[in-house]
Amino acid sequence: MINKVILVGRLGKDPEIRSTPNGTSVAKFTVATDEKFTDRAGEKQERTEWHNIVAWGKLGEICGQYLRKGKLVYIEGSIRSDSWDDKETGQKKYRTEIVANTMKMLDRRGDEGGGSGGGGYQPSRASGKTAPAADVMEDDEDVPF
């Protein structure tokens, strides 16, 4: 079975960086992707989809240091969905995130979005290091933001 996502889009806001109680960095940010199509009436349409991205550990630190709103990025990762009961309303809430394991900055220097030109980060495959399973938080209560 495969759970793999590849996105190329622009950051909707600067990343929010926090640390878990054991010191692991986590960055959260949004990426917008656009889809252009022609509807049944022949009218040109454009749809923007917003993706919630989470980057752990060293990748999260790098995202926090280099990414800014408007930058064009390549994100590779996996989809993670979560649900919980809202404490105030009792309603079931849902969230879908992309857990990033690779990020590449695609803006070139001098581009409107700014950027450092194709830099990127991918955890070492030899070491097998990605976000440690023990650091995956099951509940928003565990995330310090």
Image (cartoon, rainbow, N blue to C red):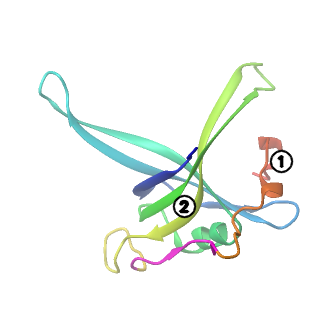
Q: Residues within 10 Å of mark 2 (few under 14, many from 20)?
A: some
Q: Is residue 33 highlighted in magenta?
A: no
Give the residue number, with chain letter if any, for mark 1. Answer: 142
Lateral position of residue 30 relative to residue 20, left or right = left
Of all residues, the one furthest to the right in this rendering is 22
Q: Is residue 2 above or below residue 131?
A: above
Residue topped by disc 2: 14
Q: Are marks 1 and 2 in contact (CB under 8 Å)?
A: no
State whether residue 1 is above or below residue 11.
above
> Where residue 117 sits: x, y (%)?
39, 79
84 vs 105, left or right, is right
Residue 47, percent from left and from top: 32, 37
- Residue 10: give x, y in percent of width and height: 41, 57
- Find out whether residue 124 is within the magenta segment: yes
Q: In the displayed structure, would residue 46 be above or below residue 32? A: above
Residue under the point 65% across and 30% down: 94
What secondary structure do most residues of the magenta stretch adopt?
loop
> In the shown orientation, is residue 104 left or right of residue 126?
left
x 80%, y 57%: residue = 135
Magenta residues (range): 117-125
Q: Position of residue 100 (x, y in %)?
A: 58, 58
The extreme front residue here reads 1
- First in sequence: mark 1 or mark 2? 2
Q: What amino acid is at disc 2?
A: Asp
Secondary structure of residue under mark 1? helix
Q: Residue at x 82, y 42 (%)?
A: 141
Between 80 and 38, the one nearer to me in the picture: 80
Which quarter of the picture shows residue 131?
bottom right
